[in-house]
Image: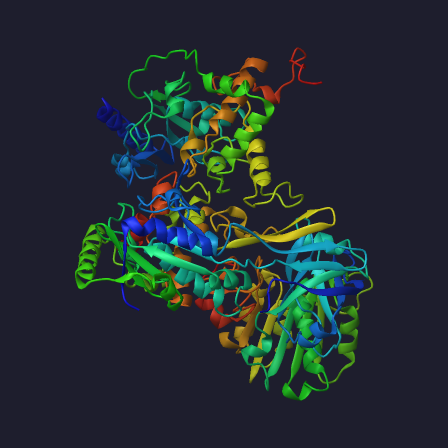
């Protein structure tokens, strides 16, 4: 599929057409910050953003999701599976880091026994990315095998040129979205390449990630874990804002005889995450829990999926209330003996 | 497409007290749909998530053997803080619950066929070992295994579970059974001694043999050196692990030991595999 | 002036650790982001030159005290010191374990270089409890309009209040940062984590969110020092202070109590006096 061009003045018409066919979610300015929210028209959107506060994982793995409903009756229990949504979702303006996280989540949720809820959402969503011409100072995607113009996990990538967007279609089903648009000229493509190079230059590598999995293999009992966790307040900001974190809890909610089984986001930072009913907890203090966070993202996930569990979006760096900076943690680990 | 989170409807056929303390019960379940029964094919060592609507789920090793057709047995201990175990212990025969599974790997996946099997269990942890023993001594399977030795101990005679099975196994000549208690009572005529000590006395042969231990950590800690002394290598000592679980299928991220999920890559691990994993269990 | 205070804190910390008067010093060091400081934990006297003092030292370090068993040197501003008083009153830490390095505070600023709202109405810039004071005391002043926002809120109708509550709290993502940043939220098992019985789920359903926040804020009555840790921690910019200020105002008007000023005064929720107001019992 060839690269296409969409003039900025035509964006409104393009989006308005999409809104008719899909439920469109894009960056929207709110009190809390810029969040991925539903839009009805192009004016709802805010495209002057480095990244949204929330990641797009909530469209594949919602924060709270009913698995099934039930009614407890005298002679039987009735279980009703949740109806799958008919209308397709379209995410517009997804940064390449969030796209890369989707690629990793696909490996976790679709391989082996597929998660039917994730699968249904994944098959009914289009993910349109927006390349980063000006990465933020907390971004570090290039340090974790990513890039500001990466297309992993995305169905198409928009690049903001001067008065127009260059569109790189990736997935086949995107073909018909852009079929009516003009093909990009070589000049447009070259300019996009230039923007990509500039963006790459703005992202100074924070550390050399090659070999971190092997380094961590031998570090389970390292003294480095004794100090890393100390200022952590054990909240879930890093986990909940992270586009790659995906651990969840399952709870039953009932009113009388009716109820539903729901799954909610959970965090390995929370003390009760691995607490057995017997009272035994294999991760009794934040030391073990922080070790788990780093090991999971840079050792276990790399081994099991081939991808890191961190995409360098910088949300945790920006929002941690005590400035527990994962970039510093990784630097310390890589520099340790 | 199959939804792995939907429980299979089951009915409780009977509930039996296993211990004098009345906090360990065996639940015998039957499938409500014949189709589900046909599709539920499992091997000893695997577990299922027991689902109680309104309370949640708990992962429990399957205590019945696949040779016991038409039913599934789960032996469940009551824990003061356990939401699901509390709900189960307040149920009666005829109540409906659900299960999801079978999940996990089996003892057979760890190369136990055509070898001698030494089963060592302690206290309440004997559940999947009951499944394995019943399976191995069955008419259709006995020839697939060489010598079968079972060593089972508990704190006191009242803590021994599966008393009926133990009586039956004692009468058999195609397996050796050694039952012991840490401390007997005035009616106890059997052996007294800790499981590790008894293992040392029984001296099961390590030749072409595999040892499977399930029990409290302290029992495992002292029995493993005895087995090593007898010549069992770490690849031939198997353990069944437990973890807090939710999804049971390797998605929710909570039951991992290193890069392995106890629900998906376990719960059966050899000592050699555990030595390669971090000590986080 | 600020540089000298940082040096003084470093010297005090070094001496404390060298003389083994404390096992650990909890203070601030330079953050990894521009305009930031971050809590630091120092056990080695040679590391004390990491300690700094500037207008970004907003975190309430008293948060790290509950249930510790060691001897701690702790840097404390006015609001932090009042939280320390509360923790001592509630037996979460012993006075003898602490060497409080008090620092009079002129207010802290946020990422946008503006002073925090709670610093603008602060009436306790000087630490109320300390073992050493770093720098000169600053002038205190009574803020007559300190409850201006709360009074505006109080005048709203019940349905308007509820609408505001819903719109503000619907931003919540249940990350628990507000609870975990608060020094007086230290329950071994928080009511939202209990499973037997489960009072409230961990969903992002509005009723669960409201139950959590109302429950938590009521638990702060007579215990909140308006240090702002909760609003500073919240990633979604929720303004809890509308509610916490109301609770604090009630503690003052109903029981004439101001949080954390004196270890020896018993907090209102641990005492019963016969002349306690009862007009709310209808």
Quadrant, the C terminus of chain A = bottom left
Q: Quadrant of residue C125?
A: top left
Position in image of residue C183 (x %, y %): 47, 31
Q: In the visual, does B145 lie left or right of A247?
A: right
Above/below status of A313 relative to A102: above
Residue at 76% of width from left, 82% of height from top? B172
Front residue (pair C148, C74): C148
Q: Quadrant of residue B216?
A: bottom right
Front residue (pair C55, A111): A111
Quadrant, the N terminus of chain A = bottom left
Residue at 36% of width from left, 12% of height from top? C140
Q: In the visual, does C270 lie left or right of C235?
A: right
Position in image of residue B31 (x %, y %): 74, 69
Position in image of residue C219 (x %, y %): 57, 29
Residue at 49% of width from left, 30% of height from top? C93
Q: Quadrant of residue B49?
A: bottom right
Above/below status of B117 relative to B92: below
Res. B133 in view:
yes
Above/below status of C68 relative to A156: above
Front residue (pair B214, A304): A304
Position in image of residue B201 (x %, y %): 64, 74
Total numbered badges shown on the rendered structure? 0
Image colouring: rainbow
């Amino acid at each position: 599929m060839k690269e296409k061009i969409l003039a900025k003045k035509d964006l409104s018409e393009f989006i308005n057409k999409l809104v008719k066919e899909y439920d469109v979610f894009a960056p929207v300015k709110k009190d809390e910050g810029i969040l991925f929210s539903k839009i009805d028209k192009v004016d709802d959107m805010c495209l002057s953003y480095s990244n949204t506060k929330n990641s797009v994982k909530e469209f594949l793995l919602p924060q709270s999701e009913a698995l099934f409903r039930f009614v407890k009756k005298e002679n039987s229990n009735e279980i009703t599976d949740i109806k799958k949504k008919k209308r397709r979702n379209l995410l517009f303006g997804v940064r390449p880091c969030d796209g890369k996280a989707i690629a990793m989540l696909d490996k976790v949720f679709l391989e082996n026994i597929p998660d039917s809820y994730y699968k249904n959402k994944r098959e009914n969503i289009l993910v349109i990315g927006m390349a980063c011409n000006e990465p933020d100072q907390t971004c570090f995607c290039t340090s974790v095998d990513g890039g500001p113009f990466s297309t992993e996990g995305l169905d198409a990538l928009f690049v903001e040129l001067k008065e127009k967007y260059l569109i790189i279609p990736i997935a086949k089903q995107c073909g018909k979205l852009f079929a009516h648009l003009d093909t990009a000229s070589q000049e447009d493509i070259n300019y996009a390449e230039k923007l990509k190079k500039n963006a790459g230059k703005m992202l100074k590598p924070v550390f050399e990630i090659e070999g971190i999995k092997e380094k961590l293999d031998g570090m389970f009992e390292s003294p480095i874990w004794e100090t890393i966790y100390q200022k952590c307040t054990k909240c879930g900001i890093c986990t909940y804002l992270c586009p790659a974190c995906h651990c969840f809890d399952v709870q039953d909610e009932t009113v009388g005889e009716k109820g539903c089984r729901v799954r909610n986001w959970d965090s390995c930072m929370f003390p009760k995450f691995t607490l057995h009913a017997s009272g035994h907890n294999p991760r009794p203090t934040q030391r073990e829990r922080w070790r788990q966070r780093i090991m999971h993202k840079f050792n276990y996930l790399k081994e099991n999926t081939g991808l890191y569990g961190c995409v360098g979006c910088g949300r945790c760096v920006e929002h941690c209330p005590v400035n527990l900076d994962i970039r510093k943690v990784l630097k310390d680990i890589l520099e340790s003996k | 497409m199959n939804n792995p989170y939907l429980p299979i409807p089951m009915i409780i056929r009977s509930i039996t007290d296993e211990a004098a303390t009345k906090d360990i019960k065996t639940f015998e379940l039957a499938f409500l749909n014949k189709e589900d029964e046909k599709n539920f094919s499992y091997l000893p060592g695997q577990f299922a998530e027991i689902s109680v609507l309104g309370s949640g789920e708990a992962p429990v090793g399957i205590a019945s053997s696949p040779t016991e057709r038409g039913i599934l047995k789960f032996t469940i201990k009551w824990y003061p803080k356990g939401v699901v175990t509390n709900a189960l212990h307040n149920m009666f025969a005829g109540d409906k619950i659900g299960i999801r599974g079978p999940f996990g790997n089996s003892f057979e996946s760890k190369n136990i066929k055509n070898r001698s099997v030494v089963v060592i269990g302690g206290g309440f942890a004997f559940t999947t070992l009951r499944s394995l023993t019943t399976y191995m001594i069955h008419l259709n399977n006995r020839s697939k295994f060489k010598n079968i030795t079972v060593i089972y101990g508990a704190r006191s005679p009242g803590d021994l579970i599966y008393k009926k099975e133990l009586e039956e196994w004692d009468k058999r000549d195609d397996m050796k059974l050694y039952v012991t208690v840490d401390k007997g009572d005035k009616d106890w005529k059997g052996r007294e001694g800790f499981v590790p000590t008894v293992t040392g006395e029984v001296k099961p042969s390590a030749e072409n043999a595999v040892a499977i231990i399930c029990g409290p950590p302290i029992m495992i800690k002292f029995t493993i050196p005895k087995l090593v002394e007898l010549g069992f290598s770490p690849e031939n000592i198997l353990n069944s692990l437990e973890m807090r679980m939710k999804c049971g299928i390797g998605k929710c991220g909570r039951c991992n030991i290193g890069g392995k999920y106890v629900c998906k890559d376990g719960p059966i691990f050899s000592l050699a595999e555990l030595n390669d994993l971090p000590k986080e269990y | 002036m600020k540089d000298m205070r940082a040096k003084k804190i470093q010297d005090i910390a070094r001496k404390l650790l060298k003389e083994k008067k404390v096992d650990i010093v909890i203070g601030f060091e330079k953050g990894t982001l521009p305009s930031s400081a971050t809590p630091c934990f120092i056990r080695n006297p040679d590391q004390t030159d990491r300690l700094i003092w500037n207008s970004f030292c907003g975190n309430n370090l008293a948060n790290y005290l509950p249930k510790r068993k060691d001897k701690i040197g702790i840097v404390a501003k006015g609001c932090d010191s009042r939280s320390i008083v509360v923790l001592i009153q509630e037996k979460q830490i012993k006075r003898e374990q602490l060497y409080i390095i008090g620092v009079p505070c002129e207010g802290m600023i946020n990422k946008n270089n503006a002073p925090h709202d709670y610093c603008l109405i602060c009436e306790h810039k000087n630490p109320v409890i300390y073992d050493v004071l770093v720098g000169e005391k600053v002038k205190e002043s009574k803020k007559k309009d300190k409850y201006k926002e709360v009074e505006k809120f109080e005048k709203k109708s019940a349905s308007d209040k509820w609408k505001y509550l819903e719109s503000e709290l619907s931003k919540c993502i249940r990350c628990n940062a507000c609870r975990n940043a608060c020094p007086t939220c230290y329950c071994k098992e928080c009511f939202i984590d209990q499973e037997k019985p489960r009072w409230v789920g961990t969903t992002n359903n509005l009723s669960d969110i409201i139950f959590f926040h109302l429950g938590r804020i009521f638990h702060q009555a007579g215990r909140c020092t308006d240090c702002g840790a909760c609003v500073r921690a919240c990633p979604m910019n929720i303004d809890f202070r509308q509610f916490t200020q109301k609770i604090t105002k009630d503690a003052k008007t109903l029981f004439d109590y101001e949080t954390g000023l004196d270890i020896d005064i018993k907090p209102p929720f641990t005492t019963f006096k016969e002349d306690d107001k009862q007009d709310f019992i209808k």
